[in-house]
Image: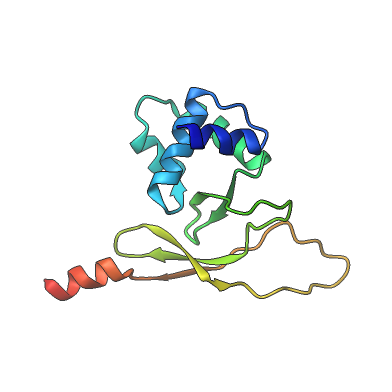
Amino acid sequence: MQEVVQKLEHKGVKPTANRMLVYQLMMDQHRPLSLRDIEEQLLTMDKSSIFRTLTLFLQHDVIHAFEDGRGVVHYELCHHHDGEDHTGSHVHFYCESCGRTYCIEQIALPEIHLPEEYHVHSMSFVVKGVCPECQHHTMLA
């Protein structure tokens, strides 16, 4: 838990018990999680406490959020250390079979040049299909 405390403090977030639980879960899962995913894993925390924690994490750039193409928001840890906005820096993959969302960090999104009067706040690219694990299970069946 000392690592979690250090990471939260580095981002300017006071490491309370709830915040540490949410951060540790996100770190252990190694994939983006929806609010529902987090609720199902942290049964001792109520939905409003989880949501407040996620909101604080977003404000302090501990996590970033993206919509998975179905209207469900997913959250994932930010692994950068500078002040840049990295919310749209890579592709996300939504598996239509198991419902999980994955980061595909090897594929960077292209830089988008909009007309001067448009200001981008975030960018997301979601690919939908079937993940390798589900493909493997289909082949065995």
Task: Give the total of numbered labels.
Answer: 0
Residue drawn 71% across and 73% down? 111
- Residue occupying the point 34% across, 37% down: 40
Q: Give how far across and how far down residue 86 sits, in percent.
A: 65, 58
Q: Is residue 112 left or right of residue 130?
A: right
**Residue 41 visible:** yes
- Could you tell me if residue 55 is visible in this image? no
From this viewpoint, which residue is outermost toward the right?
Answer: 116
In-image side of 3 versus 140 (left or right): right
Indicate the quadrant containing the C terminus: top left, top right, bottom left or bottom right: bottom left
- x and y percent of residue 82 in the render? 71, 53
**The image quarter in which residue 45 lies:** top left
Q: Is residue 72 above or below residue 90?
A: above
Q: Along the line of sight, which residue is nearer the eye, 22 or 34?
A: 22
Name the quadrant of the N terminus: top left
* Residue at 50% across, 50% down: 74
Query: x%, y% of residue 80?
Result: 63, 54
Residue at point 67%, 39% (across, down): 60
Colouring chosen for the image of the structure: rainbow
- Please state which of residues 65 and 22 is positioned toward the viewer in this rendering: 22
- The spot of residue 131 in percent (x, y) is 33, 68
Left or right for 13, reference 4:
right
